[in-house]
Amino acid sequence: MIERYDAVVVGAGQAGPALCARLDHEGLKTALVERKLMGGTCVNVGCIPTKTLVASARAVHTARRGGEYGFAAGDVRVDMRAVKARKDGVVKQSSDSVTDWVKGMKNVTLIRGHARFTAPRTLDVDGRALQAARIFLNVGGRALVPELPGIGEVPYLTNSSIMEVDRVPEDLVIVGGSYIGLEFAQAYRRFGSKVTVVEKFDKLLAREDDDVAAEIRAILEREGVVIRTGAECMALSMKGGRIVVGLECKTGEPVAEGSHLLLAVGRAPNTHDLGLEKAGIATDARGYVTVDDQCRTSADGVWCMGDANGKGAFTHTSWNDYEIVAANLFDNDPRRISDRIPCYALFIDPPLGRIGMNEAEARKSGRKILAGKMPMTRVGRAQEAGETQGFMKVLADAGTKELLGAAILGLNGDEIVHSLLDVMYAKQPYTTVQRAVHIHPTVTELIPTLLGDLKPYGA
């Protein structure tokens, strides 16, 4: 027997429940199918738990720096079980909130199980057949496990399984020097682990400007994180009870050893077991669902939102996908993916806030570029807080005075960068911010000063 709905949403990640709420508001009979975790990656094994761990690690680090601020906290000991319990409590509250939200929707039915297409607009969910005129995929992604020699011979953690660790690893080796890996590297170093980061490229964070990547490396190394770059060939093996990562780096020892191994080399979309071919839904070479500028797939009546469409790997881009879909379907508002400005953060301490173009992208655009850079040592608020690592950098179009991009690596950089992002969305010249009067003493008050000192790029 086929169950018929006006809409089926597959996946209860960031975009799914929000879209269900809108479908419910429109009076559409809707099924939300979720096979595992309400709230998806962000709530359960992504943003919320990792930033909770980062906050605990920051508190530990601050306590150890007490002498710099005129107090002594004594011997700071980390109870990882208590840290994990705090994290679990925050996650449960968030996940329960999502579940209660969905259950309160009168036109939405929550179905637990794994959805697979059996035909166009037809799904099988563990033996239940569902049909709908509109189907929305919000299936997210998972940690990518690289095909390294010896991968099947050693125990390893991913960003998901490390959430279950309730003791501080003695020696943590992290394969992958990008955003996820570096956040864990600093947090676990502060918890007390010896941490080694192994990256196959010659620098960390391949998409960042060289000076940004170099300063981030320096920040982590000042805290004792060992970083090995240029590890083009890696192989895994066991030596007694320890994990050995064989390396071919340009410098340093040919191996890295640890009690624990974390793989943080990227993400893969959860599209491999959905039966997409039976619905005529196209994917690219990496398995991401191909979508147009408004999240429509190649199959009529099917949309894909979030990580699985390859148009963004962030909670905020997933949420924006929901907004785009809802605006086009119900509001006669033709919002598009291409309207959004790239923005993201690296949540180490101090954080990096990044918006718009980097230097390579700005040069490639063919524009005449203005650039400015200011070290955080010039920022009074950073000096007062004892947080002077990093710098602020801005790029602008010399002709139109349009802001092109910015990187704020420093105290509250992940928040401050939005003052520039909003001006970019408003399509106003940087002089709008330059002439603004900001509150003293704040970090943001130095942004107008920075903008007032822009010079031709490379000068």
Image (tube, grey):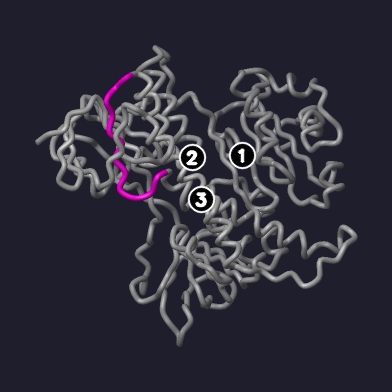
Q: In x, y percent, where is residue 26?
A: 35, 18
Give the residue number, with chain letter if any, for mark 1.
Answer: 354
Residue 55 is inside the magenta segment: no
Give the residue number, with chain letter if any, for mark 2.
Answer: 315
Whole-number angstrom distance, CA of label 2 to CA of label 3: 15 Å
Callout 1: helix, strand or loop?
Answer: strand
Nearer the observer: mark 1 or 2; the answer is 2
Nearer the observer: mark 3 or 1; the answer is 3
The stretch of residues the image draws in magenta is: 27-38
Q: In x, y percent, where is residue 357?
A: 58, 34
What numbered label is drawn on residue 443?
A: none
Callout 3: helix, strand or loop?
Answer: helix
Residue type for callout 1: Arg
Hey, which quadrant is residue 322 in on the image?
A: top left
Q: Quadrant of the N terminus?
A: top left
Q: At 77% from the left edge and 62% from the top edge, which residue is drawn? A: 63
Q: Residue furthest right?
A: 70
State the residue in front, 360 or 170: 170
Q: Are marks 3 and 1 in contact (CB under 8 Å)?
A: no
Q: Is residue 71 visible from the viewing direction of this image?
A: yes
Q: At 27% from the left edge and 41% from the top edge, which residue is drawn? A: 111
Q: Is residue 384 left or right of residue 80?
A: right
Residue type for callout 2: Thr
Hey, which quadrant is residue 402 in on the image?
A: top right
Q: Is the residue marked by circle 1 packed among few (<14), some (14-19), or many (20+) residues within 10 Å?
A: many
Q: In x, y percent, where is residue 110?
A: 31, 38
Residue type for callout 3: Val
Give the residue number, with chain letter if any, for mark 3.
Answer: 91
